[in-house]
Image (cartoon, rainbow, N blue to C red):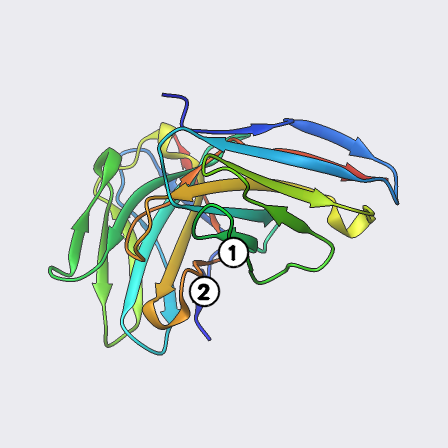
């Protein structure tokens, strides 16, 4: 069975500093990996995905994520955080052997302070 | 282009009552999904559909039924609501193929007393 772990419930960072939101996964085959963001009282919005190819994936709003197969990780990063980046972030994985099931992590709340 | 819409936005039910949540998408997507979101548990898949007239169980299907009579609509039904079904429900759609991202609706906040 596929699974996703987001080990930090909350990440605090000062505006202008780099941020990292961690994600590790477990699948039986090759993974498709996604990051979504959720602002208060809103649905999830797609940020970026890894399918194949370059391990560094660039996405919306200046975010990027690094795929590391040996560490089974897909950490979300941004070089310089903005207060407006404060939101709930979800990592998700889909195993091609698991049909159409997309498994989400528990979410990490990012707080960016001025 | 409204994307994915959900009706209603909020609802309060008493234990044992029934209701239907409606999801509609105008992107001609083949796949549609119903999730529930509970604190600290991320999103869990209830049911999904890979096309008009088809449905399949997800991770937490018990107590829910679904129907996909039209490609653009995906209905989630609760026949006899229980307090454990208090949650925020999200509908999503995608064009199909496992590497496509999903597009989410704004959610329905359901409270069962």
Task: Identify the residue shown where x is 11% and y is 59%.
Answer: A54
Q: Are marks 2 and 1 on the same chain?
A: yes
Foreground residue, A69 or B51? B51
Horizontal relation, residue A75 to residue A79: left or right: right
Q: Label 2 vs label 1: CA separation? A: 7 Å
Q: Earlier in the sequence, mark 2 or mark 1?
A: 2
A52 versus A65 height, above or below: below
Relative to A66, B53 lies left or right: right
Q: Residue at x 40, y 65 (%)?
A: A99
Any part of residue A47 in sight: yes
Residue at the image position 54 percent from the left and 54 percent from the top:
B55
The residue to which callout 1 is attached is A106
Quarter of the picture holding the C terminus of chain A: top left
CB under 8 Å between discs 2 and 1: yes
Residue under pointer 2? A5
The x, y position of residue B21, in whole percent, is: 65, 35
Q: Secondary structure at mark 2?
A: strand
Residue B46 position, x and y percent, is 59, 54
Residue A5 versus residue B102: which sits nearer the camera?
A: B102
Count of numbered badges drawn on the protein:
2
For label 2, count other residues whose C-alpha is less than 10 Å away and answer few (under 14), some (14-19) or many (20+): some
Q: For mark 2, name the chain.
A: A
Residue B19: x, y in percent? 75, 37
């Amino acid at each position: 069975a596929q699974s996703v772990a987001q080990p930090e419930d909350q990440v605090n960072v000062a505006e202008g500093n780099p941020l990292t939101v961690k994600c590790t996964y477990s699948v039986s085959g090759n993974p498709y990996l996604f990051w979504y963001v959720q602002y208060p009282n809103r649905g999830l919005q797609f940020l970026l995905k890894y399918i194949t190819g370059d391990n560094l994936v660039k996405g919306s709003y200046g975010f990027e994520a690094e795929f590391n197969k040996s560490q089974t990780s897909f950490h979300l990063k941004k070089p310089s955080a903005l207060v407006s980046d404060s939101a709930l972030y979800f990592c998700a994985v889909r195993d091609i052997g698991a049909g159409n099931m997309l498994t989400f992590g528990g979410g990490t709340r990012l707080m960016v302070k001025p | 282009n409204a994307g994915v819409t959900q009706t209603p936005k909020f609802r309060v039910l008493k234990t044992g009552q029934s209701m239907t949540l409606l999801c509609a998408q105008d992107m001609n997507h083949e796949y549609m999904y119903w999730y529930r979101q509970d604190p600290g548990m991320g999103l869990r898949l209830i049911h999904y559909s890979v096309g008009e007239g088809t449905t399949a169980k997800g991770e937490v299907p018990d107590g829910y039924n679904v129907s996909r009579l039209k490609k653009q609509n995906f209905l989630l039904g609760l026949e006899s609501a229980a307090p454990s079904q208090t949650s925020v429900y999200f509908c999503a759609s995608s064009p199909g193929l496992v590497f496509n991202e999903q597009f989410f609706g704004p959610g329905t906040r359901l409270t069962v007393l």
